[in-house]
Amino acid sequence: MDNRTVIQEGHLLAVFNSVHRVMKAEDLLKKLGLQVLLIPAPRVLSTDCGLALRFCNDENNGIMQALSREQLQPVFVCRCIKAGIFETVWKSEENNIP
């Protein structure tokens, strides 16, 4: 199995609402030299596009700043606690409906 596609404990996943947005975000972040990997979103996560960007916590600030600057914020970002278990660590304010 290719270890680059495995979601390991501590990895962060940015989940987007469309394939277009996640691919645009991946392109932007890679051009900036940030380490991200486009992966199929785990089934336990509710996603509209079925894809997510995986990255390590040490890239988190740079990634979130770049996405915010370009108005490409994900719907949410979650951290893998252990295999198949995730916690949401950031959620877009645009998606919070009172």
Image: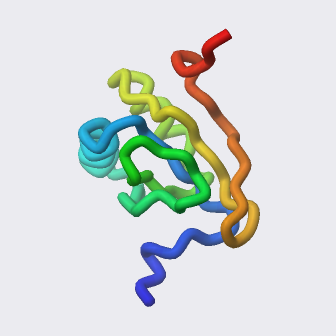
Q: Residue at x 66, y 53 (%)?
A: 79
Q: Residue at x 41, y 57 (%)?
A: 35
Q: Residue at x 48, y 30 (%)?
A: 65
Query: Residue 38 in the image: x percent, y percent?
Result: 36, 58
Query: Residue 9 in the image: x percent, y percent?
Result: 69, 68
Vertical relation: 4 (above or below) 95: below
Q: Residue at x 46, y 34 (%)?
A: 74
Farthest residue toward the top? 98
Q: Quadrant of residue 21?
A: top left
Is the N terminus in the top left, top right, bottom left or bottom right quadrant? bottom left
Total of numbered circles in the picture?
0
**Residue 32 visible in the current orientation:** no
Vertical relation: 32 (above or below) 41: above
44 relative position to 34: left or right: right
Q: Quadrant of residue 70?
A: top left
Is the C terminus in the top left, top right, bottom left or bottom right quadrant? top right
Vertical relation: 35 (above or below) 97: below
Camera-nearest residue between 84 and 65: 84
Camera-nearest residue between 47 and 24: 47
Q: How is the image coloured?
A: rainbow
Query: Residue 15 in the image: x percent, y percent?
Result: 48, 44
61 relative position to 66: left or right: right
Query: Residue 6 in the image: x percent, y percent?
Result: 51, 75
**Residue 81 visible in the current orientation:** yes
13 relative position to 32: left or right: right
